[in-house]
Amino acid sequence: MEKIILDCDPGHDDAIAILLAAGNPHIDLLGITTVAGNHTIEKVTRNALSVCAAAGIRIPVARGAECPLVTPQMVGEYIHGDSGLDGPILLPATYELDPRHAVDFIVETVMTHEPKTVSLVPVGPFTNIALAVRTEPRIVERVKKVVVMGGAYTRGNVTPGAEFNIYVDPEAAEAVFRADWDVTMVGLDLTHQALATDELQERVRAIGGQISDFVLAVWDFVGSTYQKQYGFDVPPVHDACCVAALIDPDLITTALADVHVELHGEWTKGTTVVNFRDIPGMNHTNGVALRQTDFRTSVALSLDWPKFADLVVDAIERLSAPVVNR
Ligand code: RIB
Ligand code: CA
């Protein structure tokens, strides 16, 4: 059983990540923390509660950072719409927010669980995670692993080099990559393999019911914006890849790298500069020799898409089953 805190900015793909985390028996979803990203903190927090209402789940939701650490706020309305989760009916919350700020929720949860038992899964800008590290540095040694959706080693989706979650708060991302904990970077290179294909959508449609309808409405809307913005035939399910990788580590392949975030380039700010350990002649960065221990970020390379699709379908089936059978 993997105990996780899902830090997110729902967000269409965040919504699927919540369903996968709540529906899979290998995940103990300790809480959902929200961060401004795809839309304002008000909207993404409301959306997180709406996803929980749609799924009939009662997971603590703690509201987080209203804006990035330094960089002016940018939202992803061009993909996620005015509500941040356009398409599906957004049900009203069925329970109150956790009274704690997301950062306090993260710190208290990590500090009150046994060391190396709680993993953090940031799938929006990393603002809350960076603030938590600065608030209580001891979480770094206690957290089991950090599986982030963000970055890319081939190309970005906001600029040629920068992916949205990193671009929105590059300073927070650099703080997360510099902390001495076990980070897995699930970037666009991986998540663009996790497509909500027609086949997958038909499998979800065959389940039927409220959650199936919700997911199909999510993919229908974000499929239209992804087609318009990026020319995708079907939408990528970015954030769920992080949860899937925690459910079944064999679902992805990774390679060790030294990862830095560009903070100053006029054209490159937010780019993840990924220096893979096994590339000959790259055992240095900016003229500084790298130790083997510097190559400590596991960067995701390839995805077992059929296994990924099965996990998504299974989670929706489990959540759709009558409560007595879950
Ligand atoms: O670049 C994709 C990421 O940005 C995903 O997490 C999506 O939800 C948006 O936050
Ligand atoms: Ca997200």
Image: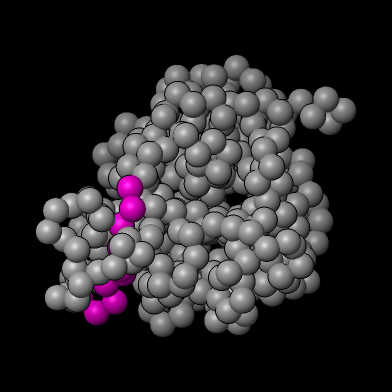
Query: For the point 64% across and 53% down, which residue is it?
Result: 4
Q: Residue furthest left?
A: 281
Foreground: 312 or 116? 116
Query: For the point 60% across and 63% down, which residue is it?
Result: 143
**Is 295 located above or below residue 244 in the figure?**
below
**Is 181 located above or below residue 187 in the figure?**
below
Query: For the point 87% across and 28% down, which residue is it?
Result: 324
Q: Residue furthest right?
A: 324
In the picture, the quarter occupied by the C terminus is top right
In this picture, residue 285 sits left or right of residue 177? left
Foreground: 297 or 166? 297
Query: For the point 47% across and 34% down, which residue is it?
Result: 250
Q: Would you identify the image quadrant in which residue 166 lies?
A: bottom left
Question: What segment is highlighted magenta in the picture?
Answer: 255-265
Residue 63 seen from this side: no
**Residue 131: x and y, percent?**
55, 77
In this picture, residue 210 sits left or right of residue 129? right
